[in-house]
Image: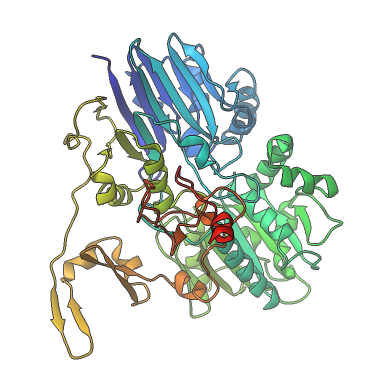
Amino acid sequence: MLELACLPLAVGHADQGICLQVRLGPHRVLLDCGLRDLSLLDEVMADLVLVSHAHPDHARGVLALHQARPKLPIYASEVTTHLLPLNWSGADSEASRVGLCQALPWQTPVEVRPGLTVALLPAGHLPGAACILLNYDAGPQTYSVLYTGDFFLSNTRLVEGLPLENLRTLSPNVLILEGSYGTARHPHRRVQENQLAERVHQAINAGQSVLLPLPTLGPGQEVLMLLRSHHYFTGRELDIWVDGQVAEACDSYLAILSHLPASVQNFAQHQPLFWDERIKPRVRRVNSPQERSRLGCSPCVVLTDLYTDLGDYLPTAGQCEGPGQSWRVLLPQLPNGRADGREVGGRATIGQHNLPAGWEAWLQASRSGSGTTDTPISVETYLLGDHCDGSSTTQLIHNLRPQHVVFVHGSETYLSDLANLDELRNRYQIHTPNPGLLVELPIGESFYAATPAAQALPEVRYEGEVTELDELVSLDLPGEIKQDPRWRMFADTGLIEARWQGEELVLRGLTPRELLSASSETEPSPGSGRSCGSCRFFRGQRCWNPESPLSSFKVSPEGYCPAYEALEAWRVGE
């Protein structure tokens, strides 16, 4: 019997990174190498390595692996080969540009081993990011594995979203995909962008400077393009400063301009994509520590590395002609945790999630009065997702209809939430593997529950008491529910949403972000493309087409299914 299995070496829990070995008959394929410790690969065979995209959690170990096994072929998209060196510095970065990675074309199967072909499909998320399709011809039958890497259905400022319509005919036997946000549902990407722009706009109007610590590759450039092109800022007397590795990544984007969407290339024909001191708002690079320490003397926006030292951007006594400006620090909410901020007594405090190195010591000194500045600071968080949310994840699965679904890349709690969805458990063989445990993936056999080594984490249930009063119903829950790490998010505002789901009453907490955006967020308007948002059966964020595999499920407006019917055509004939 042909061996089809997956050996996860790292599955993206916390800061673990991603590295998976897929076994297809005699072939051993390594998917990504985001390992910090390459000793995990000492006993692992590999015929080739496929890199989905250039983010560190998927690619930081690629150079060390190449140095340890120089004859091992490494493949990626052409754009990813250009962006990979951003994971290393100095001599390592220069050395990695020669002979490290071979580029594969888009959407063209390439035979990399006898009977084994690889095809790369655009995944959204980041320039060059790819879904990887492996097909192994075993004679009477072909076996197919699709690995999504990180994917995103929505278009962003610099990347076109994953075209779901192009994937629905693939029908892979096995789907390995990320579950970064679990079952959470997010507002449309444009809504998130407008909310961030609004907060920056408000801060500048209030005389504050804005500090945006960002992941180097992807979010840094996306936020910069948002600030350059949003109507709040076009033509405005404002300086946007870019510092650190975020600035280096901007230079790398300029080298791949011909691979970016046509709208971006058109923008670049009329003005520089990033560095521009002539057109307002002006975009400038920080060139020296002295320049950095003067940035807060007048209102401005600063984009810098996520793990940076706040103190570098705060003017010391006498540095500015007048009093230094107050700062509003906007931290991104990351998939595997939250960056929490709140202002207490005029000083910033930050929770213990995703703290950049060096921040806590600086904040302690600032609160105790021993710091070098009296600059008032407020710290807030925002969401600008570039990973799929829960509805996008389930929509991809229902379109592809694999036999096996393997969830990786996310906290154990989030992956367990996905694996315990009835709409998935009742249709597919679900696996949430732990590192080092082989997951066998037999094809064509009758449905069976996942093996203990690969099964979903146990679902914890809490028993409470329901009391019916004259005009309301009271729910009493046990105290141990507060020990669950999700309780803080659930009870953050003290408000909940209740809705029927079949015979079950589903409760969820409302976040401050949802309350703030409730008045501005509307249901996405139908677009002109062949997507759920322009389908006649898309109502209330769900599909109501009885002929669709997504019928009654929540769907993303950017998605697609074979039963699509254009809204405009229906209206003409009604």
Compared with 533, 166 (above or below) is above
Residue furthest front in the image: 573
215 versus 194 height, above or below? above
Left or right for 143, reference 478 = right
Residue 13 drawn at (x, y percent): 35, 43
Residue at the spot 69% in from the left edge and 44% down from the top edge = 250
377, 558: nearer the viewer: 558
Quadrant holding the N terminus:
top left
**How far from the left and from the top, in percent, is residue 234?**
77, 64
Outermost bottom residue = 470
Residue 467 vertical placement versus 441 (above, below): below
Q: Which quarter of the picture shows residue 501?
A: bottom left
Relative to the observer, which residue lies in front, 260 or 478? 260
Q: Position of residue 10 (x, y in %)?
A: 36, 34
Asked if one can make out residue 211 in the rendered structure from this viewpoint, the answer is yes
Q: What residue do we see at 56% from left, 45% from top? A: 161
Left or right: 231, with 337 as reference point: right
